[in-house]
Amino acid sequence: MSNNSILVVGGGFAGITAALEAAEVGYEVYIVETNPYLGGRVAQLNQYFPKLCPPSCGLEIQFQRIKNNPKVKFFTMAEVASVTGGPGAFDVKVKIRPRYVNANCTMCGECEKAATTSVPSEFDLGVADRKAAYRTHIFAFPQRYVVDAASCAPGEMDKIAAACPYGAVNPADAEKTVDLQVGSIVWATGWKPYDMAKLTNLGGGKLKNVVSNMQFERLAAPNGPTNGKILRPSDGQAPKRIAFVQCAGSRDENHLNYCSYICCMASLKHVTYIREKNPDAHVTVYYIDLRTPGRYDNFMQKVAADDKLTLVKGKVAKIVECECQSPIVTVENAVTGIKSEEKFDLVVLATGMQPSCAGSKLPVQVPVDDDGFITGGAENGVFAAGCAKMPLDVMKTAQTGTGAALKAIQNVVGR
């Protein structure tokens, strides 16, 4: 007998879109998200295409739709442990990690004040620290704190629990397993930035004033570690000369051999951040090709007209650091053939987009390519969406979420 419920793995923009499209035509949907919040990578951005909206703009609408639809159920801090059965009759085990904070939480922040341990913030991609009791960001959904028990010093958990005036912190919380029966699965696990540590010629993630494009998003975001001010991580000063290095790990047989699609547009968007926040700064973009498909070409032409922006066609060979921690970029201009060394206050690496599931064994039977992107699975009742199947921008990610929802519905209806 077929089960008409649908499992959506991943609570980013693609997963949320797929879940809501299915639920709003009457299907029960379960979202499984590994982070403590829904919203995925979009939640970490300062702005996103096509309208350069803040993430709260689009996500708040989606969150309201989830709140108002009883057919959508979601699990955060969760992952799919196993999948058995087949199309129309999947048995799924979902493992939920302890959050140590229950629904009594009012986001008052007393637990965070009581916490003493600080560790690098995953949400801020390491450019800031967080406490052992923390909220990821101001518009997190669900609106609830998290306690990182593994980071707590001896006795710290008890102090955190005692500080909560609402009894929301539960030190006895434990891992749980939930069994679900579903008819279709949408796999929308999104993407991760390529690891800068592997880019040894570009500093290997060890140079203080060399950051990734996603770290730059957090530096520019009003809810980020610098309250939206673009500052050098080493000394908190506003950078006057900034370089962007395109294809940092992309289109490279030693790293990611494909184009990550969004990197050029993201860097051009970042130039608009700089112009808004540091209007006198000079910016250089080193690129192989500037790829701005379709209507994004108009955006590129507008940004390129900036008289404080220099576009240099050339491959960056290496980045080192001078005594004052300013990055020195070695690059050969592909047009003039001149090799030069340029010193900047801040360098941003346009690191590639890698599927989050790359390098891991999936609990479902789906084909993946050498890079970890899902290339099929429909015959097994599994439908990929968003950046789990290819590099995409937010708009196209949402479109694939809608498409996956339709296929998932057709899969259960046809049985």
Image (tube, grey):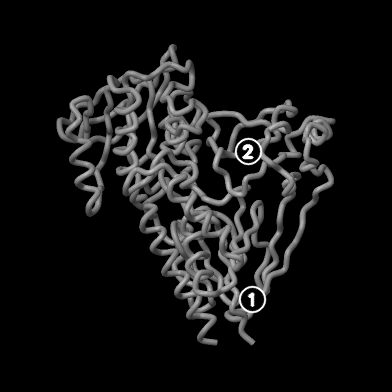
Q: What residue is shown at x 77% (from left), y 53% (from top)?
A: 175
Estimate the x, y position of residue 140 in percent, counting from the top left: 57, 44
Q: Is residue 279 visible?
A: yes
Q: Is residue 182 above or below residue 113?
A: below
Mark closest to the chain's N terminus, 1 or 2: 1
Q: Amino acid at mark 1?
A: Phe
Q: Which residue is mark 2?
A: 135
Q: Where does the N terminus fall, quadrant-wise?
A: bottom right
As measured in the structure, the alpha-carbon distance from the residue carrying label 1 to the one carrying label 2 is 34 Å
Q: Is residue 136 above or below residue 308?
A: below
Q: What residue is shown at x 29% (from left), y 21% (from top)?
A: 281
Estimate the x, y position of residue 265 in percent, counting from the top left: 30, 44
Q: Where does the C terminus fall, quadrant-wise?
A: bottom right
Residue 254: numbered disc: none
The quarter of the displayed image where residue 398 is located: bottom left
Q: Which residue is mark 1?
A: 90
Which residue occupies the extreme front position in the image?
A: 68
Q: Amino acid at mark 2?
A: Arg
Q: What residue is shown at x 56% (from left), y 70% (from top)?
A: 185
Q: Secondary structure at mark 2?
A: loop
Q: Counting other residues with Cα less than 10 Å from the Cα at mark 1, is it few (<14), some (14-19), or many (20 or more)?
A: many
Q: Is residue 358 visible?
A: no
Estimate the x, y position of residue 205 in percent, counting from the top left: 49, 31
Report whether 48 appears left or right of 161.
left
